[in-house]
């Protein structure tokens, strides 16, 4: 019976070395038995570096009860294991409060740190009902080539919008709050090719009104013209 007791053991992780092809652990077993270089067996496509402060629990198998060589087949840390999952839910987590949860109503990705995604080829996202992104700080998007937004309508709700390059609009420009243009090249602030139509209001150039200006020095009759009509 003692031989059978030597096959399986339970202890705590006191050291870990994940630099090797197969991680090795130092485990303190019951009765202060310390075993070094125990191979940590992990499934393909999954790895996790356990904390080595003597708190994570390790479950060890010693083939044929030989305590000189063993395998750690599972490491758990009850301090950080999430609770309250619904039946069927899956969660990947760490000790910093970061987690990816396959919940009943969707996927949750939470991190108090930063989130980095590196994509070598292309990214395609199809959203059925809609998407909302809330950012408490700033957002920066950099594209090495072109960027295209295809939508029936696009709304930008911002106090100010700055375009550093050339702005080309192929459709109608409808402004409700007025327009101010400063600068420009060749001493010209704005150039209009085609017909410029003022539907309502006046046009003033260098302090001269297009609607109310008159001309002096008119020959014959009055010395000035009447207002334009």
Image: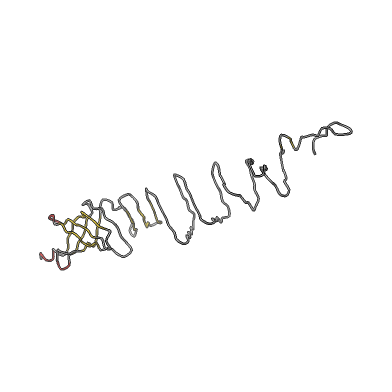
Asked which quadrant contains residue 103, the reply is bottom left
Q: Give x and y (percent) for residue 80.
A: 28, 51
Identify the residue at image location x=26%, y=55%. Answer: 50
Is 160 on the left-hand or right-hand side of 188? left
Is 152 on the left-hand or right-hand side of 31? right
Residue farthest to the bottom, as pictured: 64
Colour mapping: secondary structure
Q: Is residue 92 above or below residue 202?
A: below
Seen from the viewer's position, the closer of residues 83 and 100 is: 100
Q: Is residue 57 visible?
A: yes
Q: Give x and y (percent) for residue 34.
A: 15, 57
Seen from the viewer's position, the closer of residues 84 and 224 is: 224
Residue farthest to the top, as pictured: 223
Number of callouts: 0
Asked which quadrant contains residue 17, the reply is bottom left
Asked which quadrant contains residue 75, the reply is bottom left
The quadrant the N terminus occupies is bottom left
The quadrant the C terminus occupies is top right
Identify the residue at image location x=55%, y=47%. Answer: 156
Is 141 on the left-hand or right-hand side of 165? left
Identify the residue at image location x=49%, y=56%. Answer: 129
Residue farthest to the right, as pictured: 220
Residue farthest to the left, as pictured: 2
Q: Give x and y (percent) for residue 13.
A: 21, 55
Seen from the viewer's position, the closer of residues 178 and 35 is: 35
Q: Is residue 204 visible?
A: no
Q: Give x and y (percent) for residue 83.
A: 30, 52
Seen from the viewer's position, the closer of residues 83 and 13 is: 13
């Amino acid at each position: 019976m003692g031989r059978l007791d030597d096959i399986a053991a339970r202890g705590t992780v006191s050291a870990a070395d994940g630099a090797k092809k197969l991680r090795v652990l130092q485990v303190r077993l019951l009765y202060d038995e310390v075993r070094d270089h125990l191979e940590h067996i992990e499934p393909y496509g999954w790895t996790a570096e356990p904390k080595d402060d003597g708190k994570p629990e390790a479950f060890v198998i010693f083939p044929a009860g030989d305590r000189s060589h063993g395998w750690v087949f599972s490491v758990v840390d009850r301090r950080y294991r999430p609770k309250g999952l619904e039946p069927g839910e899956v969660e990947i987590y760490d000790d910093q409060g970061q987690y990816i949860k396959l919940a009943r109503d969707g996927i949750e990705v939470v991190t108090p740190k930063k989130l980095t995604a590196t994509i070598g080829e292309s990214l395609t996202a199809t959203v059925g009902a809609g998407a909302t992104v809330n950012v408490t700080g700033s957002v920066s998007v950099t594209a090495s080539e072109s960027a295209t937004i295809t939508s029936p309508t696009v709304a930008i709700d911002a106090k100010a919008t700055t375009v550093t390059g050339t702005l080309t609009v192929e459709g109608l420009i409808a402004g409700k709050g007025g327009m101010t243009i400063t600068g420009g090249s060749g001493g010209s602030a704005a150039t209009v090719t085609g017909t410029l139509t003022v539907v309502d209001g006046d046009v003033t150039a260098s302090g001269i009104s297009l609607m109310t200006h008159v001309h002096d020095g008119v020959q014959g009759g009055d010395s000035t013209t009447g207002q334009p009509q």
